[in-house]
Amino acid sequence: MDSSMNGGLTDAVRRFQWFYACHVRAPHELVEHSALSLTEMRVLFAVMHAGTCTAADISRTLGLDTGYLSRMLTQFECAGLIERQPFSGDARRNQVSLTAAGETALAAVSTHVRDDVSATLNAMTPDERAQLLASMGCVQRLLGPNGATQRVRLRGPRPGDFGWIVEREAQLAAGGVQAQREREIRTAMVVADYLTAPDPGRNACWIAEQDGVGVGASLLIGMSAGSARISALFMEPGVRRGGIARRLVNACVTFATESGYDRIVCATDLNPAPVGPLLRPFGFEEVSGQGEWEKRLEETCAN
């Protein structure tokens, strides 16, 4: 990323942070409702959301110095806000959890936060709330720390998903505007074939969803009585290390096997490039000169 683009993106993120600070009162920002400091509120809310955690967990989550955090936890323990118990299997570490007094101390602040958020959401239409939820999920996924736990599930398509597949396939295609337009046309034709198939039970589509937000998709279409093709496959940026692509491919292979296909093919120009490292573990082999990968199906499929 060049310096001018990086500077513009940095400014945009800072404007969003300022907007959020002005219009959304997060729990740790409502210090006027508590005698605790900003950082102390952040620590207690981190413990509350974790349920039970260690000091190291809190330090990593909030980026706090371990010595500073240890002194703060000792003060909390003396005040009766938290309790520490030896960590199972390691007496050198302690599990931290809120006491009843600690929960009470946060209850008033939590009530103010809930009321503020509820008032804002109640003024929105259902469609606006759905859009807000999806947007917050994207922000959290893209700005969250690397290695953060990803709760991903595969589900079937819903109304609007196929339009999203066409849109994202086009936008994620490499090679500039012309390549994106060509990918958009191709994917639109694939979706049309899927939706108008004479035997829809021979086709399948999966949407990968992380915390309620779509982050990938795969689409399998029967070519003949014995052959099926993975006709679309993509993952959103920032989730490609989460094993989502493997799960989407495995869903295609499993469905094709259970549906009685004896062959499944996949083009080499799919969005996760190169596709070889993704497909080889499932037994796909590259078909020389044909621009696609092929797997002969057996009674069992790859895990």
Image: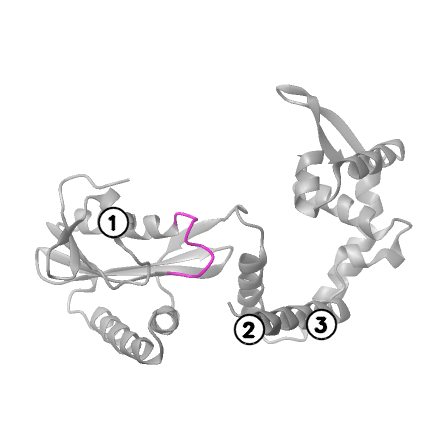
Residue underneath mark 2: 5
Q: Residue at x 84, y 45 (%)?
A: 105
The kind of residue tagged 2 is Met
Between 232 and 108, the residue placed more toward the observer is 232
Q: Residue at x 85, y 56 (%)?
A: 31
- Disc number lying in front (1 or 2): 2
The answer for how far apart the CA atoms under marks 1 and 2 are is: 35 Å
The kind of residue tagged 1 is Leu
The kind of residue tagged 3 is Phe
Q: Residue at x 55, y 67 (%)?
A: 135
The answer for how far apart the CA atoms under marks 1 and 3 are is: 44 Å
Considering the numbered disc 3 on the image, is that residue within a helix, a strand or a loop?
helix
Give the farthest residue toward the right.
Answer: 35
Mark 1 nearby-residue class (10 Å; few <14, some 14–19, many ≥20):
many
Give the main secondary structure, helix, strand or loop, of the magenta stretch: loop
Residue underneath mark 1: 279
Mark 2 nearby-residue class (10 Å; few <14, some 14–19, many ≥20):
few
Say whether residue 125 is visible.
yes
Task: Decide: is 182 above or below 97.
Answer: below
Give the farthest residue toward the front.
Answer: 3
Between 207 and 280, the residue placed more toward the observer is 280
Q: Which mark is residue 19?
A: 3
Residue 158 at x, y percent in the picture: 38, 66
Instruction: Answer with mark 1 or mark 3, whichever residue precedes in sequence.
Output: 3
